[in-house]
Image (cartoon, grey):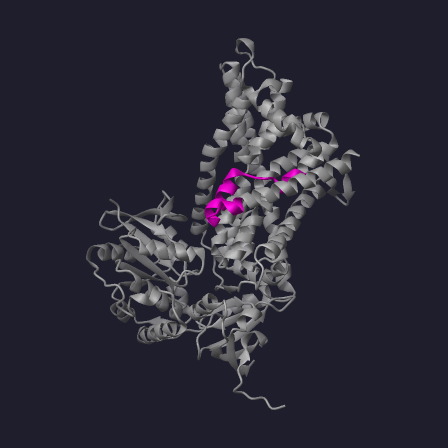
Amino acid sequence: MILNKEIPEKLGELEPGCRAEIVGFAPADGLKDFLYRLHEVGFLIGESIEILQDAPLGGDPISIRVKDAVYAIRREDANLILVNRTARS
Amino acid sequence: MKKKIALVGTPNAGKTALFNVLTHSHQRVANYAGVTVESAEADLFLPGGDIATLVDLPGAYSLRPYTEEENVLAEALRGEAFDGMILVVDATQPERAIRFLIEVLDSTALPAVIALNMSDLAEARGFEFDLIQFAALLGVPVIPAVATKRRGVPELEGAVEVALKNQKREKGAFFGEATTGTPDSSRILAFYKKADELLKRVLIRKGFPDENSRKIDRVVLHPVSGPLILIGVLGLVFQLMFNLAQYPMDAIDSFFSFLQARVSEGAFSPAWTSFLSDGVLAGIGGTLVFLPQIVILYALILFLEDFGFMARAVFLLDHWMGKVGLHGRSFLPLLSSYACNVPGILATRAIESRADRVITTLIIPLTTCSARIPVYTLLISAFIPNVPVVAGVRLQGIVMLGLYLAGILFTFLMGGVFKRFLFRGRRPPLLIELPSYKRPSLRSLLRGLLYRTQLFLKRVGTVILAVSVAIWLLVSFPRGSGGAPAPVEESYAARVGKAIEPAIRPLGFDWRIGMALIPTFAAREVMVGTLATVYSVEEDSDVSESGGLSAVLKREWSPATGLSLLVWFIFAPMCISTLATIRRELGSSRYMVLSLAYLFGLAYLASFVTYRIFSS
């Protein structure tokens, strides 16, 4: 299978240890306020992020480092954020 | 007229710690902009000798209100309540700091001073700011500070004084006024681009990420050790709350018994002796006895929150709380509610979504607040034999634990029910910062405790005192012939009790219990005092100590009645302060009526079933 690096993935589908760059946002029907809040805390296009950990027994939510802060977001909600992987550690 | 200074900052920037080092005693609850804000305010001494009032407003990521707390901040700054402000930001989060600063400075022309807090951590991690450029670009003084070490305090006081006198600023100098309106994404993006450009000119060197917190998180959020640590911490919290509190509680108890004894020995008329001893002292003493438990629980909560653990607890619990329709953010309000439901409900302001906030508020009364403990203790000692069950564990302890577990079970159960029937649809999103771990500041902890204690004492001195006196009056009047005490059966309270007896008969309650239940609407813990008053007046003997009262109850009531009342208090509808807080916080009587109705229904049903089972 050929992986096209240019097709963005949903952030909620990444595993801990992944680094990625934000390339866009999915349509946020009914979640506009949440999307704005994501922007406000630093989730913006071009930003590098890193998935640090996922919660025990269920793998949800995940902790994500953006800029110098770490946030917990549920995978379902993180799917609003579209990313390209940059590296795996 | 004292000048009013708003203390404004981002969450986790150490705003409250700064408040505590900038101000001195005389902390008060502040009311602003039409909403009751439980913000603290206190005196700020300026170097020139003037005294200003500093108001600790809720923290916010931006002025666009997303949570109720942020709404409070936006409203407060929009009004004319303030003469100046201190903006507190976290120096280890420069991007977020500068965005917040520009947004707030753009939204108002109030004179401002910036406190660049945690500058020691920022320095240790390699961040370097051009402070002169920073102040010049923003047009306001920038003071590096370390609130927990009292660093930067005199500089801030001086800067505030100068700013109040001389600073002239314009609204919207950076991006125009509209940064606070409902934004579309492109506008936000343009705004942040501008903020980042500004930051480039201010931040000389970027620091390293916070590796320490990352290391701690590898353990605290670990799939195996994480849940174990969480359970251990919660277990320890409740252990300390009950065991450590025992000694001061006994001391308070003895002190009030001593006072009551002195009153009986004093040269008062019998009516005055009864008023002082059974009315005033029994009521106040019976409530004050919880102060140690409340103080200990809050001390631990404040400590864990300052340390950074509470956000991790949300992270660990969110998935599981979601299974029953709750939000991870509901954890802290629910935990606070174990001391008292009222501050628990106030803590729901930090929950972003209205649905989650309403659900959490509705189920908070099911958490076992400390006011139920004396009722549990009394009834358990009267009706549960203290036989050993397994290795050192006795039945009484198991029943106590069972009552707590029943409370937890119904909290989650009702959460699921409300979610299912009131707020269907997609789960509101979760976004919570996992802040850097910090060593909690003792001074902040003590100030927070002092404040909580003040609120509690105020309640004891007003509501509880008034209710205790009212109950005493109802139980002691009308007087019999010649002013002598009439039999309790003829008192006003007994008449009320007898009037409702048909309704509570199926639960195994007689009119005496009925009249003791009525004042529990004012405060649940009054139950014990009322029963003591009723039976001491009736038996004309001293049953003020709980051992005495529990012996009387054992003699007077059937076991089925005792157990039924015990079960009633799992739901314990309902204290007036809690109801009033629900109405005020949710802005609607509808939810107040709903919570009253469902708690009453559950209590009645459960007590009825219990009584049927044990009386057959």
Residue B320 visible, this orientation: yes
Up/down of B136 relative to A23, above or below: above
Q: Describe residue B382's horizontal placement relative to residue B575 as left or right.
A: right
- Pinpoint residue B146: horizontal percent, then vertical percent: 37, 60
Magenta-colored stretch includes residue B554: no
Q: Is residue B150 visible?
A: no
**Rendered image quadrant of residue B332:** bottom right
What span is colored magenta in the figure? B567-592
Q: Nearer the viewer, residue B206 or B573?
A: B573
Q: Looking at the image, which residue sits at the far left?
A: B166
User: Which residue shows up at 48% across the image and 47% down it?
Assistant: B588
Residue visible at 56% across and 74% down in the picture: A12
Q: Position of residue A35 (x, y in %)?
A: 46, 69
- Give the quarter of the figure containing the N terminus of chain B: top left
Q: Please report the residue visible at 58 percent of the width from the left and 88 percent of the height from the top.
A: A3
Query: Looking at the image, which residue sits at the far right?
Result: B616
Where B396 sits versus A43, above or below?
above
Q: Residue at x 64, y 26 (%)?
A: B511
Q: Nearer the viewer, residue B336 or B299?
A: B336
Q: Is residue B52 above or below residue B457?
A: below
As for residue B568 lying within the magenta part, the answer is yes
Horizontal arrangement in the rendering, residue B360 relative to residue B81 (left or right) = right
Decide if residue B561 is on the left or right side of residue B204. Answer: right
- Residue B49 image point, x, y percent: 23, 47
Residue B596 position in % (x across, y down): 57, 42
For the C terminus of chain B, give its image quadrant: top right
Q: Nearer the viewer, residue B130 or B551?
A: B551
- The answer to whether B200 appears left or right of B352 in the picture is left
Residues B3 and B576: in front is B576
